[in-house]
């Protein structure tokens, strides 16, 4: 962990009052913790705006496993993704519907491409990316 720096901010009173109430509702112990959390969220979000940044995330998909060849297509998309897939977890939601969490780490462009490939497979009902960080540089 890097060292700490002290900063001061100038902000409108009404905004600060509302922010302090939000901090309390969220359970942050201090303003510093709350501001630091917001800054880290902004930086992680910014990483995902650059196609060449190294990030981590989860692609969550829901699909009907009865659809023809869907499992083969899903496996092929993951193997073709340039090794961004670390592992996946499968849950059988009911007789037909499956949910998978595919944990990924790599360049934003490669992860987005994998997401697009999966999303376009016939029978995929929903496919979203949860965007997070590798933890480096934060
Ligand atoms: Ni299943």
Image: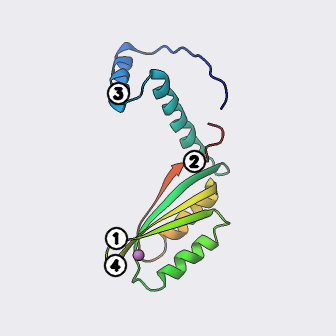
Left or right of 18? Residue 43 is right
> Which residue occupies 61% across, 48% down?
134
Q: Which residue is mark 4?
A: 96
Q: How many marks?
A: 4
**Of marks 2 and 3, the one in the foreground:** 3
The vertical placement of 96 against 81, above or below, is: below
* 23 over 56 or under it: above or below: above
Q: Which mark is residue 22?
A: 3
Label 1 vs 2, first from the N-terminus: 2
Dot 4 beta carbon under 8 Å from ligand 1: no
Mark 3, other Cα within 10 Å: few <14 / some 14–19 / many ≥20? few
Looking at mark 2, is its residue's CB closer than 8 Å to ligand 1? no
Query: What is the C-alpha distance between the residues marked 4 and 1?
Result: 8 Å
Q: Quadrant of the C terminus?
A: top right
Tell me the quadrant of ligand 1: bottom left
Are dots 2 and 4 in contact, CB under 8 Å? no
């Amino acid at each position: 962990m890097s060292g700490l720096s002290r900063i001061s901010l100038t902000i409108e009173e009404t905004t600060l009052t509302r922010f302090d109430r939000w901090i309390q509702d969220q359970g942050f112990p201090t303003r510093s913790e709350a501001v630091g959390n917001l800054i880290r969220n902004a930086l992680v979000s910014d990483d995902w705006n650059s196609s060449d940044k190294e990030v981590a995330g989860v692609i969550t998909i829901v699909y009907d496993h009865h659809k023809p060849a869907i499992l083969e297509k899903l496996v092929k998309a993951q193997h073709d993704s340039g090794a961004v897939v670390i592992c996946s977890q499968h849950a059988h939601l009911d007789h037909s519907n499956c949910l998978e969490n595919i944990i990924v780490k790599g360049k934003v462009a490669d992860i987005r491409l994998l997401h697009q490939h999966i999303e376009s497979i016939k029978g995929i009902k929903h496919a979203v990316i949860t965007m997070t960080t590798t933890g480096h540089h934060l």
